[in-house]
Amino acid sequence: MVLTLSPAHLLLLFAVSALLSTSLAFQSDELLLDDEEFGLEGGVHTKSPDLTYTRSSSSPPPPPTATRRRPSDQDTDSKIQFELHHAFGDSDFSPAGSFSARLKSWSHGGQTLTKLRFSRNAFTEEEKEKFSLLLKGDDFYSIRLPSSVTNPPGRDYVISSVKARCLLREGLDEHFVIHTDGVNILAVNYGSPGACPYPRQLRLPSKWSFNSHTILKNSEQAPRAPVFAEEIFGGEGVEGEVVPPQERSFWAKYWMYLIPLGLIVMNAVTQAMNMAEEQVGAPSAGGQAQQPAAIQRGSSSSVRRR
Amino acid sequence: MAMSMAVRAFLLLLLFLSFTNLSVSLYEDQVGLVDWHQQYIGKVKDAVFHTQKSGRKRVVVSTEENVIASLDLRHGEIFWRHVLGSNDVVDGIDIALGKYVITLSSEGSILRAWNLPDGQMVWQSFLDGSGASKSLLTVPTNLIVNKENLILVFGRGSLHAVSGIDGEVLWTKDFAAESLEVQHIIQPVGSDAIYVLGFVGSSQFDAYQINPKNGEILKHNSAALSDGYSGEAILVSSDLLVTLDATRSKLVIISFQDGEINFQQTSISDVLGDSSGTPVLVSSKLPGVFSVKVNGAVTLIRVTVEAKLEVIDKINSVAAISDAIALSEGQQAFALVQHGDGKIHLTVKLSHDLSGDLLKESIFMDNQRGLVHKVFINSYIRTDRSNGFRALIVMEDHSLLLLQQGAIVWSREDGLASIVDVITSELPVEKEGVSVAKVEENLFEWLKGHILKLKGTLMLASADDVAAIQEMRLKSSEKSKLTRDHNGFRKLLIVLTRAGKLYALHTGYGQVVWSLLLPNLRKSECEFPTGLNIYQWQVPHHHAMDENPSILIVGRCGRGSDAPGVLSFVDAYTGTEINSMDLAHSISQVIPLPFTDSTEQRLHLLIDGNQHAYLYPRTSEAIDIFQREFSNIYWYSVETNNGIIKGHVLKSNCIQEVVDNYCLESRDIWSIVFPSDSEKIIATVTRKSKEVVHTQAKIIAAEEDLMYKYISKNLLFVATVAPKGSGAIGTATPEESWLTVYLIDTVTGRILHRMTHHGSQGPVHAVFSENWVVYHYFNLRAHRYEMSVIEIYDQSRADNKDVWKLILGKHNLTSPFSSYSRPEVVAKSQSYFFTYSVKAIDVTLTAKGITSKQLLIGTIGDQVLALDKRFLDPRRSVNPTQAEKEEGIIPLTDSLPIIPQSYVTHALRVEGLRGIMTVPAKLESTTLVFVYGVDLFFTQLAPSRTYDSLTDDFSYALLLITIVALIAAIFVTWILSEKKELREKWR
């Protein structure tokens, strides 16, 4: 089903669908028709607005929107939609939801995906049963996406799996990181947003609804090797490196000389003081005191000899 | 002014370098103390003897490793050697003018002349051609045109006549238009013309008669072969060729006498009698005789003048037949080699008279050398004026031996030039009671040695003493002991060569301890056997005294990756095969698991081409251990051609007719699909499984901060390039070439980091250690090679810095690490220019991972450069702060320095360098490095110097004497003081 709609129709459709869905499920209140781009370059901004947050409950999913083309004045932008499939353990893949994104064509020929939105189908009763089995067996819950969004599935599907027990929080928390290169999806990393340490406990979810987080990631630009062309000629940089050592204080630079010098000086001073003391005491007491001492010593030795 | 500035800058740089002292260089007298170097040439393809009466007797050989070497015939030593690149395959070799070695290489497009005595290149010619064809080199002995000796070369569909003196191309005749598949170029004796003989298509024979002066075609004859031909044509005489027809049931004799081509067909069964098996013509040049090999038996057939065939001899179990060589009286002789009861039998016969043998010798041969593959003979005049013969034989294990007078004169282990894989094994533990006696016996020697050393230290040694000290240091018997040492320097290097032979080399001097030609790769049912890898199978720790470790050798029978595998288990101490297995499945991956059974055999998982997993050893105990960890085993596979990386887990037992508990099915749990129009996988690197990381924390003193390394064993580094940029450097513009690097968790398939280098291309060489990757590539914009580093840090543990949290236990440092947790990682990266192109990169490994790391870079000059990891630190900045400098951060420069002293290989070259392997010693500071290519090199490295041990030349005697002197002095002074006190008391 491919429909071509004018903007007015589009608005109408969304208003209607919003009315229909607000009562049943949370929908992002983000305005769809704005044209400002959210930066998707690099994947560093984890908290950037390209992280869409969707919550679906066990209500019937919103009607699938068809692939449309925007009017001619915004020819470089096109809407695109691709499906998410899931599998329980060894089972075959079945549709589980759909991503819609805007494909922006750049003047230089490249195309990038922006403004990813995700709508997840809620689990049917059968799927709930299968998932419970996975939880009991600590088995894998797998998802897959086409490797090319323009002509799915591209060369192959990109698959990602997680132990089903890892998804369990209050409800079911899931986190998609989709690595793209233009219109191609390289890989999808699927898992829980938090930690999932090894002895995984068996719990059953209290409510069967998904909290979905999605991130689009593009390749980062590698840092270039530094080029110091000016320094080769100027020699300024080498000169500049000499300056910081001169900022050190006098003490910091010469403490190893100053301390011994100080010790020597102190030593000399104390010695000088001792000398002075002796010299002061010598003329008054020296003559008299030494004489009796000598006599005493002489007498004692003479006594011993006897 | 500028000059003085420059000088100052230079001095500062020098000062800076001398302070940092990053290179650990060695002194001249330390060369050879811990390192050894062995030179090889590879399996000999062709040999030309040069034994003139005067001068050295030598043989010039070309090998499968593209080496041209001149060997001493007396000792087998290399006079000179040239290693041509891997894309410069030697096609032909000959001696011209008695003084030049002529080589033809690169599919007949490069002709070189080397001076015979010293191996200097005399000239080199590039021969252009338009087509592709077999290349032939012919050096006629008596073809002199305009006083120049001609060399005839057929290559790339053209015939070239090249002057032997200066390599000038005199004329060229293009045969590419005729699509001639050339078989022979001959110049019959007494004829002025050159004949070019070959086939066109599948059933036409052409003979061209060419004027040697200008390359004009004098005559051209062609005739159709009714039954086609197969294989090559053998030139029997100057006007007769022999070939087999397409069904290999008839012998076709082609005579092209006087410009007329005649065919004569004879059924093989008529000549040989009834025989089954496919006949093969043996390509040995024998005059008037050719030989057919059927089922290992060789029949020699003579072609008479009337082109009749005459069976002259039938010899069973012939291993090799040499070409005929001319003897003095116009006779020609050839050699054939047979095997029998542990000996080889060399027979030399005259080619016109096969009844008598000129020489018959039996030589005992080590059966680990296998069969004789090739034989080349050479004659000499004996003292009694009769003809003597020497034979150069090439064995199955690629070794080269010279036989003369019934003995092996010398042998060369040239199989070691083509090492496929290396592992190390510990030596046996020293048994008590052995070493003590030995020490006592040599006590005098020991003392003498130390006194010599003492003299050396005190500078009292004479020149003779110095030489004795040096010799003693080099030849210490400690080094080559076959027992474990305290520091873990002595080990066995177990190498697997392309010939399917295992060698155990001792790290002391590189001597071969044992060797084994793997029996299950030699079986007749195993076609194109290839040895793949070696693994540690059993390393006994509990019973190290009485049990030997064993190794697992994984091989494959056949060329494709789907060929069935073979396993061999070999005792690492004795080199005997304990067990072997022929597998029904192929082997695409071998995963050593981190579990061992009660006998300490390591569990291995072998993955076949259909993604089935097989568990070895096949014991019930192994399966019990395995079942416990069943759900925790993950692995990945890289489909390079497809551009897909997949992750797998085990699912269930194989669904087969026969129940096999050891066969397991797998399923894919993740996949990464690289877009085929923009990315192509060129390199994947993982961490070494045995690497030890000392600490997860990295202290950043400058910011008083702490970072946690993201250390996971399951990280994979992948580099992809744009398909246009995957060719050689220079084939793509910077705009259409880019390099993307990935860090992937192989359990969940998560891409942890992804980064693009625009305007760059491969080849990429990378090494992954701890939490960092260093990789080398080419930057097309800067026209230089670059090296980049990526370090990844774990942010989820980053807030564990609060002391209070640690005290109260509110930290997550002990929480288990899981790949399923969403990682919060930060990657830091920096790039630098690097001058050299690189052949291999590795990193030093130490026992506890405390010692700082050095990168070992195998450069294009076949040397190994040690580069401190600190040069590749993403935190380097142009002006580091004082705190950063104290931490050891080097100011940022645009290129990585190459310090001449930091070459690990010092003055030596490891020709044809292919790989570097590092093994930790028991001593934390030291790591053992083994470098292999055509040559082998081994050394010990201490990246942060040997801080934990005394050096080898530490003088224990001096220490002892000092202690003795001190004790004596204590006694003397004590006695003196006693006496003095006594005297004092008596006063």
Image (cartoon, grey):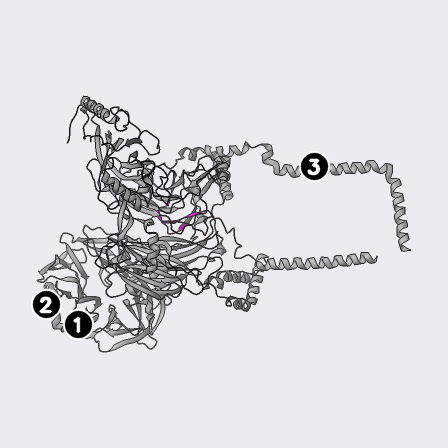
Residue A153 sits above or below residue B135 on the image: above
- Name the disc covering residue B641, or none: none
Q: Which residue in the protein does label 1 denote?
A: B301
- Which percent across, then down, holds residue B546? 43, 65
Q: Which residue in the protein does label 3 denote?
A: A265
Query: CA separation, marks 1 and 3?
Result: 110 Å
At 90% from the left and 49% from the top, the residue drawn is A299
- Element class at badge 2: strand
Q: Is residue B433 left or right of residue B986?
A: left
Q: Is residue B424 left or right of residue A160?
A: right
Query: CA separation, marks 2 and 1?
Result: 14 Å
Characterize the local packing of mark 1: few (<14), some (14-19) or many (20 or more) Cα atoms within 10 angstroms. many
Characterize the local packing of mark 3: few (<14), some (14-19) or many (20 or more) Cα atoms within 10 angstroms. few
Which mark is first along the chain, 1 or 2? 2
The quadrant in which residue B270 appears is bottom left
Circles 1 and 3 in contact, beta carbons < 8 Å: no
Q: Which residue in the protein does label 2 denote?
A: B265
Q: Which residues are magenta?
A: B835-864
